[in-house]
Image (cartoon, helix red, strand yellow):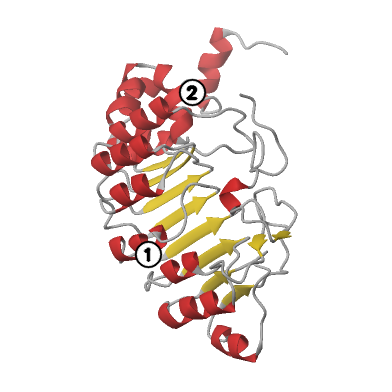
Amino acid sequence: MSSITSGRRRRLRRSGEVRPSADWADLPIDALLSVLHKLEPIELMVGSAGRVCRSWRRAVRDEPELWRRIDMRVRKDRRYRIDEGTAREAVRRGSGRCEAFWGEDATDHFLLFLAEHAPTLKSLRLISSNHISNEGLIESINKFPMLEELELSFCKNVFGKVYEVIGIACPRLKSFRLSFPCFYSIEDAEYNKDEEAMGIATMSALRSLQLFGSELTNKGLTSILDNCTHLEHLDIRHCFNIYFDTALRAKCARIKTTRPPHGSTDDYEFYIGNPVRTRARKTRRDYAFFGNSIYRGFQVVP
């Protein structure tokens, strides 16, 4: 590739054909934030943006605007996990203004930390967080009164009546997602398959609900539909205890979008286990979850 002499370059600059290099250190703060907003929080934390120059490093460290939405989920383009220390530092940088946190492997301690440092949180998505307990979630969820979106997928130690507590503590909740590694149904007449559904029915402001692989029955779904009158989007794929009889079809008629139990899963991001029906008194919490990745198409390098 041929080089351009300095004299030739000066002539080209004067003619407007070549522009001088931008001095990134002198960018106005608004322009700098516009550039940095194109990077994800994890890239700001571990990437090279903070090493470009002093003004970039200061912005990455001290501008809460960059940390209003924190996404630290493992994805196909991120072949590593983010530890809790990194997540805590990202939340700290939000200086109380963080409105959304999405992550994995969260713990009870981290949830309490998040509640303390992000009191106006509106969106919380927790995936594969097996160190979150009912007790820990109940203690922290009461500190998120502004919450509008919640996901608790593959959190095997969150179950039962905790969903009723969520419905009472978060009256503004508009979107709720709950996914299980597979449909797992205990065929025992004394076993209550609708305990979680009855709790979800207290989330009366819901507009969108995803229950993937849930064992709820028509009774539980009917309770949800009767109490969540604003519901517009319903995803009950792989909920194989649901049978669309005439009464249930009539109740679902007002829903704008319904994804039925046998609907396509082509756009579902997680692995899907084979359906299980058993008479054994094991719960879904005893059933083996997926290995080192719950996502389709890639493996996470420890």
Looking at numbered disc 2 in the image, what kind of residue is underneath it?
Gly
Looking at numbered disc 1 in the image, what kind of residue is underneath it?
Glu
Of the image marks 2 and 1, the number of the one nearer the N terminus: 2
Instruction: Work out which quarter of the rendered image holds the N terminus and state it.
Output: top right
The CA distance from mark 2 to mark 1 is: 41 Å
Q: In the rendered image of this protein, does residue 165 appear above or below residue 134? A: below
Residue at screen point 56% across, 66% down: 191
Residue 224: where, in percent of width, then height?
Answer: 47, 76
- The quarter of the displayed image where residue 200 is located: bottom left
For the residue pair 254 and 239, the one nearer the viewer reads as: 239
- Are there few (<14), some (14-19), or many (20+) residues within 10 Å of tag 1? some
For the residue pair 277 and 179, the one nearer the viewer reads as: 277
Question: What is the secondary structure assignment of the residue under circle 1?
Answer: helix
Left or right: 115 as drawn, with respect to 249:
left
- The quarter of the displayed image where residue 98 is located: top left
Instruction: Work out which quarter of the rendered image holds the C terminus and state it.
Output: top right
Instruction: Tell me the residue that label 1 is attached to.
Output: 164
Question: What is the secondary structure assignment of the residue under circle 2?
Answer: loop
Residue at screen point 53% across, 68% down: 192
Q: In the rendered image of this protein, does residue 250 appear above or below residue 156? A: below
Instruction: Tell us which disc is closer to us: 2 or 1.
Output: 1
Callouts 2 and 1 close, C-beta under 8 Å: no
Residue 251: where, in percent of width, then height?
Answer: 54, 86
Instruction: Tell me the residue that label 2 is attached to.
Output: 47
Residue at screen point 54% across, 29% down: 81
Left or right: 146 as drawn, with respect to 157:
left
Residue 44: where, in percent of width, then height?
Answer: 43, 28
